[in-house]
Image (cartoon, rainbow, N blue to C red):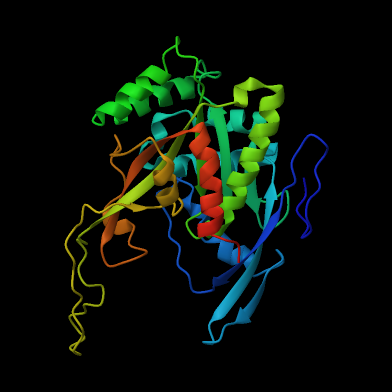
């Protein structure tokens, strides 16, 4: 369904996709991940938002450029396949090659539950996605079978979480588990997330009346965090032929403090029965290759949250309060 600047009317059995306007500073940074991870699209938002995609540039009170971007909300379409596949690879980061994600992308597009965000019409690539798949109903799908075993293995050091997840995934257990897949480009604002979750919940309520496979007892949310590491790079300003005095940069120590890639995870934590951070099986890029935010490098890690149905509904109101639209 098209996003043309007005509220987008759906057919009688679908929800209304809405539009949100983002006001962003033109000098915000983005960075690229390793090839194929999905981060190669990270600078498209700034590039496309300055052309014919319904955006314009203004000056704020400090004289800085402000880019106004219209974000349109769409259902999943077949044309989104490659972008969705890239976003899934980005979400799983270094461990993405362990999974045949094309099967998961196909399932997401087929069931059409959830939302994408685009800035240049229906035919353009999405910059964000949110969907949920039934891990019980599609347990025979190879990628979900492998993800199930992967998740159980990753939380085994969190004994209570491990026991609960194993129990939920047994064939005798009747509780359905929805795997929530939310990912976006690094420079997308968190304010687009509450409408996406709200529309997802409304969709699930409608679908559950006709098909109980969307009536989940638990939601397993896959996400990412990062820790900081001391940079191994020499001062990039050093030059043996340049004897001018220069300020030395202070390198701070590595920290075990975890920071979410998805700001809304702070709210999800307050509603989660369990949450757990894990390291990837495969070695990712050097931490110094991801120094977009500070002098230290960053080390991404996987993150899982298990949320009961009633708590999942509650978090939407908390998100709307914490991250209202511009």
Q: Is residue 151 left or right of residue 220?
A: left
Q: Position of residue 129 (x, y in %)?
A: 58, 45
Report the quarter where the C terminus lies. bottom right
Residue under the point 76% across and 37% down: 14
Q: Quadrant of residue 46?
A: bottom right
Q: Is residue 317 left or right of residue 220?
A: right
Q: In this rendering, is residue 294 above or below 81?
A: below
Q: Quadrant of residue 245?
A: bottom left
Q: In this rendering, is residue 58 above or below 15?
A: below
Q: Position of residue 304 (x, y in %)?
A: 38, 37
Q: Nearer the viewer, residue 116 or 240?
A: 116
**Residue 188 seen in render:** no
Residue under the point 25% across and 27% down: 159
**Residue 210 seen in render:** yes
Q: Position of residue 124 (x, y in %)?
A: 68, 51
Q: Nearer the viewer, residue 90 or 269?
A: 269
């Amino acid at each position: 369904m098209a996003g043309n600047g007005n509220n987008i009317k759906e057919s009688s059995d679908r929800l209304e996709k809405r539009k949100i306007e983002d006001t962003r500073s033109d000098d915000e940074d983005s960075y690229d991940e390793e090839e194929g991870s999905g981060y190669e699209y990270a600078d498209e938002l700034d590039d496309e938002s300055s052309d014919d995609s319904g955006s314009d540039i203004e000056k704020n009170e400090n004289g800085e450029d402000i880019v106004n971007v219209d974000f349109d909300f769409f259902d999943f379409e077949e044309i989104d396949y490659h972008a969705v596949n890239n976003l899934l690879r980005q979400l799983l980061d270094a461990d993405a090659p362990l999974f045949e994600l094309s099967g998961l992308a196909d399932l997401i597009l087929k069931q059409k539950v959830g939302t994408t965000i685009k800035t240049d019409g229906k035919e353009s690539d999405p910059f964000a996605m949110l969907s949920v798949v039934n891990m019980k109903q599609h347990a025979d799908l190879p990628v979900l079978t492998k993800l199930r075993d992967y998740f159980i293995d990753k939380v085994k050091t969190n004994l209570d979480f491990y026991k609960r997840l194993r129990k939920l995934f047994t064939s005798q257990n009747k509780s359905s588990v929805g795997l929530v897949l939310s990912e976006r480009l690094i420079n997308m604002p968190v304010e687009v997330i509450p409408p996406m979750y709200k529309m997802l919940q409304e969709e699930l309520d409608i679908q559950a009346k006709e098909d109980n496979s969307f009536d989940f007892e638990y939601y397993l949310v896959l996400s990412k965090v990062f820790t900081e590491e001391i940079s191994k790079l020499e001062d990039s300003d050093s030059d043996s032929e340049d004897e001018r005095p220069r300020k030395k940069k202070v390198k701070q120590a590595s920290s075990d403090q975890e920071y979410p890639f998805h700001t809304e995870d702070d709210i999800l934590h307050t509603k989660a029965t369990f949450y757990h951070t894990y390291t990837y099986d495969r070695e990712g890029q050097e931490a110094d290759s991801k120094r977009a935010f500070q002098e230290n490098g960053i080390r991404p890690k996987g993150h899982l949250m298990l949320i009961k149905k009633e708590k999942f509904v509650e978090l939407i109101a908390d998100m709307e309060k914490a991250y209202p639209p511009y």
